[in-house]
Image: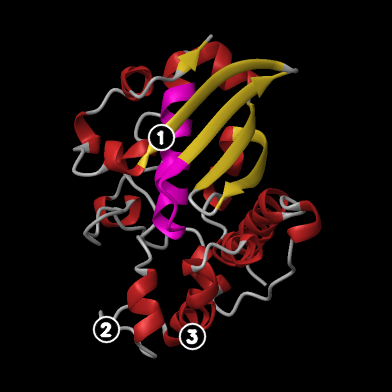
């Protein structure tokens, strides 16, 4: 096997390790082990889409490397759970049928606000998987059918180098990804370092709607949303 192929396999194994670290045991008793029918979509280089209108603004489409300088500008594609409930096949002609089958099967429970259904969606889609390198750990909790929480442990080096910019960029991206895949109205995000809280902010869906993310300064936006950073 060539060195190029070996390198690709090693990269895939590293990605799997990171995805597993984010997705493992986040939900306590509600955590569900779900086999991914569409795991290939998490492979490096696959396109991500701008949340909201489904516009293709992913890093692959723009040839842009995902960094803390642009992390918040892209997000997972928004799942229309009502459409998933009503139709057995994707109407956009882009979503893989196997993925849509999952959406269609679980949509009634998601729309009912079931905690276990939310856990299954997050375990299966793993929307925060590509953020593993930016946080030392993440824990997700449901605070009700309309509210979800993400608590993350800061990467010390990133926090020391970038401070508020790190906290703002990561928290905004987390919120966008969670609002894209769950029909909640609010996302509470806390960031800590060695037991000390560095960030607390609640993003509401209406605050993010119609925002031109390319022109936002994340730290300022966090404060405009009532967030606190230290």
Query: Where does label 2 land, which residue?
Result: 91
Range covered by the magenta-colored residues: 167-186
Helix, strand or loop at disc 1?
strand
Task: Answer yes or no: is residue 95 visible.
Answer: no
Q: Quadrant of residue 94?
A: bottom left
Determine which residue is flagged by label 1: 203
Q: Nearer the viewer, residue 1 or 11?
A: 11
Vertical arrangement, residue 195 with respect to residue 177, above or below: above
Q: Nearer the viewer, mark 1 or mark 2?
A: 1
Disc sitting over residue 63 in the figure: none
Is any atom of residue 219 visible in this view?
A: yes
Mark 2 / mark 3, whichever is N-terminal:
2
Looking at the rendering, in which quadrant would you find the N terminus? bottom right
Q: Position of residue 168 (x, y in %)?
A: 42, 24
Was residue 177 drawn as part of the magenta stretch in this picture?
yes
Q: Main secondary structure of the magenta part?
A: helix
Query: Which residue is situated farthest in the bottom direction here?
Result: 88
Mark closer to the chain start, 1 or 3: 3
Residue 18: percent from left, percent from top: 67, 50
Task: Say which residue label 3 marks.
Answer: 101
Residue name at image x 74 percent, y 18 percent:
195
Residue 207: image x %, image y %?
Answer: 29, 36
Residue 57, percent across and down? 25, 53
At mark 3, the secondary structure is helix
Label 2, residues with CA under 10 Å away: few <14, some 14-19, many ≥20:
few
């Amino acid at each position: 096997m060539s060195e190029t192929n070996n390198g690709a396999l090693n990269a895939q194994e590293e990605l799997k390790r990171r995805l597993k670290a984010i997705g493992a045991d986040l939900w306590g008793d509600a955590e569900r082990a779900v086999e991914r029918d569409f795991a290939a979509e998490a492979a490096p280089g696959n396109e991500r889409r701008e949340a909201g209108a489904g516009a293709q603004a992913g890093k692959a489409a723009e040839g842009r490397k995902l960094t803390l300088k642009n992390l918040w500008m892209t997000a997972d594609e928004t799942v229309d759970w009502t459409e998933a409930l009503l139709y057995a096949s994707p109407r956009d002609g882009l979503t893989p049928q196997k993925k849509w089958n999952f959406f269609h099967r679980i949509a009634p429970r998601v729309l009912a606000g079931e905690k276990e259904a939310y856990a299954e969606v997050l375990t299966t889609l793993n929307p925060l998987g590509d953020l593993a390198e930016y946080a030392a750990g993440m824990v997700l909790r449901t605070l009700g059918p309309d509210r979800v929480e993400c608590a993350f442990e800061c990467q010390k080096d990133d926090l020391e180098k970038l401070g508020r910019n790190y906290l703002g960029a990561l928290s905004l991206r987390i919120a966008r990804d969670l609002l894209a895949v769950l029909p909640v109205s609010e996302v509470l995000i806390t960031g800590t370092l060695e037991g000390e809280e560095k960030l607390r902010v609640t993003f509401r869906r209406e605050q993010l709607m119609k925002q031109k993310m390319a022109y936002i300064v994340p730290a300022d936006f966090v404060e405009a949303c009532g967030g606190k950073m230290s």
